[in-house]
Amino acid sequence: KLLVSPFHGQRMEKKYGLIEQVFSNQWDKREKKWIQPITLRTYLLGWLFDLSNVPIWTAPDATTLATSMDGSLVILPGIQTDITTISMDSTDPEFARKLMLADHEMANAVLRDQVARRARQQVGYLQAKLAGTTVEDYRQTLLSLLSSQEKTLMLTQTDASFAAEILSPP
């Protein structure tokens, strides 16, 4: 779900500037502006939408990018294993390869950041509780929990894949 979410699309656009590449057929590089594609639908309904002041087309954004990814990514969960196969339909294999690697990197970073943020909150909470606890059994329990959260926090600080591992590169 993360790979095709608008949140993920927004982060992908911010880091890689993908909207102009994915929707290059609607982007005028020379004029640096979006061009509305002319389709039979826009031609037939254009005047009706103009009369009602309802836009028939809007320039691509992070949500459009996420919708595009949802249409081009093929996600097949494993039936007998935990391995999920993710592939992509594209006319440009090199661009698809780069996009899939960037998508993996960004999704991994999002999940790593969420886990790290939660672990930091837990560490802060446990440290505050530990400072006010004098009963030895409670202190030992809190120290054990604190140790576990510190370990989680350490694991989020490495460069290694955090949430998913690429077994076979695109």
Image (spheres, helix red, strand yellow):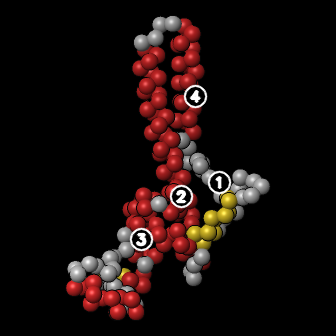
Mark 3–mark 4 CB contact (< 8 Å): no
Q: Which residue carries the number 4 mark? A: 148
Alpha carbon separation for disc pair 4 and 1? 23 Å
**Residue holding disc 3:** 64
Report how far apart the C-alphas of labels 2 and 1 lie in the structure. 17 Å
- The residue that appears at 57% across and 10% down in the rendered structure is 137
Q: CA distance from mark 3 to mark 4?
A: 40 Å
User: Picture quarter containing residue 72?
Assistant: bottom right
Mark 2 vs mark 1, foreground winner is 2
The residue at which mark 1 appears reads as 165
Dot 3 amino acid type: Thr
- Asked if the residue under mark 3 is in contact with the one under mark 2, i.e. CB atoms within 8 Å, the reply is no
* Secondary structure category for the residue under label 1: loop
Residue on which disc 2 sits: 1
Secondary structure under the numbered disc 4 in the rendered image: helix
Who comes first in sequence, dot 2 or dot 3? 2
Q: Which residue lies at the image location 51% right of the left edge and 57% below the top edge?
A: 2
Circle 2 crowding by C-alpha within 10 Å: few under 14, some 14–19, many from 20: few
Residue type marked 2: Lys
Q: Residues within 10 Å of mark 3 (few under 14, many from 20)?
A: some
Point out residue 63 in the picture as x, y percentages from the top left corner.
40, 66
In the depicted structure, whether residue 91 falls above or below residue 72 = below
Cβ–Cβ under 8 Å for marks 4 and 2: no
State the separation of the CA atoms marked 4 and 2. Answer: 28 Å
Q: Earlier in the sequence, mark 2 or mark 1?
A: 2
Mark 3 / mark 4, whichever is N-terminal: 3
Q: Nearer the viewer, mark 4 or mark 2?
A: 2
Residue 1 at least partly seen: yes
